[in-house]
Image (cartoon, rainbow, N blue to C red):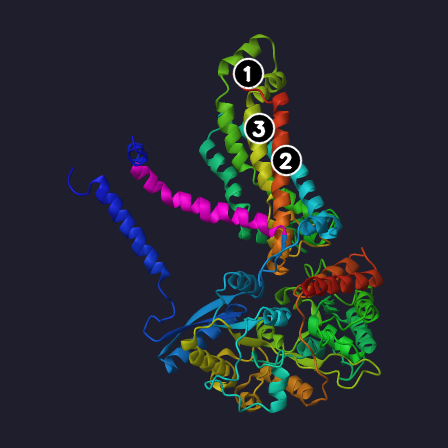
């Protein structure tokens, strides 16, 4: 059978319909990916032809204090905000799973921040809430605490963005809720018969059977947290200040690429981030063997 | 099945895709109503956007064979869009140039020469003026406004508070002493000024009074660590004395005037900012005065800053005359200024400068007066920011911020700032 007729048999029309997707994949993802890999080994200021400079961009990172500041901010953010966010999401999912009246309303209401949390509007709202004489400042002043603008205090500014991320717990919450619904009720009944209380049921039934969902959420939210950009850009006015305390890694890539015109260095930074995310994800997968329980294990 | 079979559908889809592709590849140079279409890129706030849209519409009404496609953005977004357009070799036909990018764009050969375009009338400028506009010995950008460094103060509050400002030629220390005194004694609990050591023109004024420059003719940093440190020290003393707003009070560096305008008597800045800023406080009257003058200031320290526009080097030949007309409308036509106001500073063309006095409002007259004084003063040449310094103000703001937070002292901060600026220049020169 010729290749053409085989292709036809396998669904020529389907291939035609897939052309836009293939074009998108190649032109919008694959080509820029390969181009950025090449650019990461060049000195490229956008305005002139890229010049190959070997590993210079990668060497430069080690001496770049802002690179290390960005790494520190991003790592702290990931390490603190993800456990808090997932913990909060699980807690709310457990509460909603108890069959509350108006469940659909609460689910939508709690999911809403996930849609809005990364928007410019909410980041601006955050500036108002945590700004000088803002809602938080006024509330604390009742207790004699006058901290001024949290966003201009290097010790507090990152925490406001962590709170913002935790607030967007709706997306993992909905996934947790779906996972909780999949746990067979008879397992709880069996546990009760064996004398297990609520805490024991939670630790011995709910958590083990929910580990694939926890793992899924952990991977998704970690990757997302490493790529945090909009909130930091809006809240700090694009500077990553005060004193680099909100200089997220992606914000620094953006500054180098689009403000400094140093696209070669920005590409190298982007590749380091991609490799770091890949490594973290790989480590998660390796460690998952020890704590994620699949039904067919 | 009636109608289209699968083969027919595939042919139709392929034909449609081909048609769409050909349409997309079609030239975009012709205006919708016939004639040429020019892309015009500028930055600003909403008020400026609306005013310029109106003025561009008036231009196309007068020149029916020319259409104008506006490309507007806020200042930072404008520069970012320019960057991507340059990468794609798809820059607007006429574009404004952000101050840190003048020589960067020049090095990238973005500008077309202007003195061979008959529709751009240069007869209103002296030879000395035209020479001062040139970059690399060629007239390839056109200034369309003049800014000078100023101190802007709220005259209404000064009167209400019964304070008398120091003489116009006061020195920096006397001005600082006045601010400290004002902050301590005014009944409104206002501060003297906002904390703005990263204000570029006032910093340049400070340097030139000390015989230094911001940038040298050969594209280097023209200032020393000592002068920079003295500048940061001056601000730091004001901050510690409580005479300027804290970072918390002004919500960071580069404060929003709508916020700090309620909290301070005065601010340093550019002369043209009074036009838009004063409108935010219509019940107040604002005045301008030159920046303080250091004792023993060098002769020729006053300077003019020109915002510039250019015609893109890659413009189609058939559009050049039309582009010249539009640049001419921007730079030499008082009718346009009547529409857009003097938000981009005093007119550069001396004749238009004089004509603009007839329609200028009180804030604009205030601005014209300080520019006129600087224009008439002895002035040594000033040079544009060299390639590699596009983020020098960001670096300065970062250091000023760290000084304010007590994380670095003024000596180390000044050295770090200069090192960063020089490293940027060196990287570009490699």
**Seen in the image, is B121 located left or right of residue B68?**
right
Q: Can residue A251 be seen in this view?
A: no
The vertical placement of A52 against B370, above or below, is above
Q: Callout 1: residue from which chain?
A: A
Answer with the quarter of the image where residue B255 lies.
bottom right
The vertical placement of B236 against B131, above or below, is above
Q: Residue at x 61, y 56 (%)?
A: A263
Nearer-N-terminus badge (2/3): 3
Q: Which residue lies furthest to the front in this view?
A: A2
Indicate yes or no whether the magenta region holds residue A24: yes
Secondary structure at badge 2 equals: helix
CA gap, disc 2 to disc 3? 19 Å
| First to last magenta residue range | A12-41
Answer with the quarter of the image where residue A213 lies.
top right
Give the residue pinned by disc 1.
A297
Q: Could you tell me which quadrant the C terminus of chain A lies in?
A: top right
CA gap, disc 1 to disc 2? 25 Å
Secondary structure at badge 1 equals: loop
Q: Is residue A150 visible?
A: yes
CA gap, disc 1 to disc 3? 17 Å
Q: How crowded is mark 3: few (under 14 residues within 10 Å), some or many (20 or more)?
A: many
**Seen in the image, is B347 located left or right of residue A182?**
right
Give the residue pinned by disc 2.
A279
Give the residue pinned by disc 3.
A214
Marks 1,2: beta carbons within 8 A: no
Secondary structure at badge 3 equals: helix
């Amino acid at each position: 059978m010729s290749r053409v007729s085989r292709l036809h048999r396998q669904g020529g029309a389907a291939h035609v319909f897939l052309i836009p997707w293939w074009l998108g994949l190649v032109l919008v993802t694959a080509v820029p990916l390969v181009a950025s890999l090449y650019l990461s080994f060049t000195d490229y200021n956008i305005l002139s032809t890229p010049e190959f400079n070997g590993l210079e961009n990668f060497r430069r990172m080690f001496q770049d204090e802002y690179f290390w500041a960005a790494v520190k901010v991003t790592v702290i953010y990931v390490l603190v905000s993800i456990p808090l966010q997932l913990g909060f999401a699980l807690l709310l999912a457990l509460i909603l799973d108890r069959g509350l009246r108006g469940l659909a309303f609460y689910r939508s209401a709690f999911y809403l921040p996930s849609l809005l949390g990364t928007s410019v509007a909410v980041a601006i709202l955050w500036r108002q809430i945590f700004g000088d004489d803002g809602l938080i400042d006024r509330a604390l002043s009742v207790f004699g605490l006058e901290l001024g603008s949290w966003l201009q205090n290097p010790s507090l500014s990152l925490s406001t963005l962590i709170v913002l991320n935790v607030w967007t717990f709706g997306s993992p919450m909905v996934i947790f809720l779906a996972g909780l619904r999949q746990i067979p009720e008879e397992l709880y009944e069996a546990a009760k018969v064996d004398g297990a209380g609520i805490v024991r049921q939670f630790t011995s039934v709910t958590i083990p059977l929910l580990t694939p969902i926890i793992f899924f959420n952990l991977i998704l939210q970690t990757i997302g947290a490493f790529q945090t950009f909009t909130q930091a850009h809006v809240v700090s006015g694009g500077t990553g200040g005060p004193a680099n305390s909100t200089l997220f890694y992606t914000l620094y890539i953006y500054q180098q690429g689009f403000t400094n015109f140093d696209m070669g260095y920005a590409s190298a930074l982007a590749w380091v981030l991609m490799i770091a995310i890949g490594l973290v994800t790989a480590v998660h997968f390796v460690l998952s063997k020890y704590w994620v329980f699949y039904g067919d294990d | 099945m009636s109608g289209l079979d699968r083969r027919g559908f595939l042919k139709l889809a392929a034909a449609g895709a081909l048609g769409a592709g050909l349409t997309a590849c079609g030239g975009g140079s012709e205006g919708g109503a016939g004639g040429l279409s020019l892309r015009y890129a500028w930055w600003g706030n909403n008020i400026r956007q609306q005013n310029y849209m109106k003025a561009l519409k008036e231009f196309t009404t007068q020149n029916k064979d020319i259409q104008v496609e506006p490309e507007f953005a806020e200042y930072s977004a404008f520069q970012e869009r320019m960057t991507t357009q340059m990468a794609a070799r798809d820059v607007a036909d006429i574009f404004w140039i952000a101050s840190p990018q003048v020589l960067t764009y020049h090095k990238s050969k973005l500008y077309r020469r202007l003195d061979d375009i008959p529709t751009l009338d240069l007869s209103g400028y002296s030879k000395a003026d035209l020479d001062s506009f040139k970059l690399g010995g060629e007239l390839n950008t056109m200034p369309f406004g003049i800014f000078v460094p100023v101190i802007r103060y709220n005259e209404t509050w000064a009167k209400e508070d019964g304070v008398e400002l120091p003489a116009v030629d006061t020195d920096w220390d006397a001005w600082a002493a006045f601010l400290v005194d004002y902050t301590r004694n005014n009944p409104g609990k206002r501060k003297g000024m906002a904390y703005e050591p990263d204000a570029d023109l006032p910093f340049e004024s400070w340097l030139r009074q000390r015989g230094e420059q911001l940038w040298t003719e050969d594209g280097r940093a023209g200032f020393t660590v000592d002068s920079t440190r003295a500048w940061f020290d001056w601000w730091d003393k004001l901050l510690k004395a409580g005479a300027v707003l804290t970072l918390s009070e002004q919500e960071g560096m580069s404060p929003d005037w709508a916020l700090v305008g309620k909290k301070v008597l005065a601010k340093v800045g550019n002369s043209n900012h009074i036009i838009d800023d004063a409108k935010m406080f219509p019940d107040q009257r604002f005045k301008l005065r030159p920046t303080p003058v250091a004792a023993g200031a060098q002769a020729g320290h006053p300077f003019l800053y020109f915002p510039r526009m250019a015609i893109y080097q890659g413009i189609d030949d058939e559009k050049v005359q039309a582009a010249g007309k539009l640049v001419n409308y921007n730079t030499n036509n008082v009718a346009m200024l009547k529409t857009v106001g003097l938000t981009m500073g005093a007119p550069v063309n001396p004749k238009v400068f004089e004509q603009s006095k007839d329609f200028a409002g009180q804030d604009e007259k205030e601005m014209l007066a300080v520019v006129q004084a600087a224009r008439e003063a002895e002035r040594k040449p000033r040079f544009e920011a060299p390639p590699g310094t596009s983020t020098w103000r960001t670096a300065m703001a970062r250091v000023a911020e760290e000084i304010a937070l007590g994380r670095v002292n003024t000596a180390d901060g000044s050295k770090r700032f200069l090192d960063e600026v020089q490293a940027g220049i060196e990287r570009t020169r490699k």
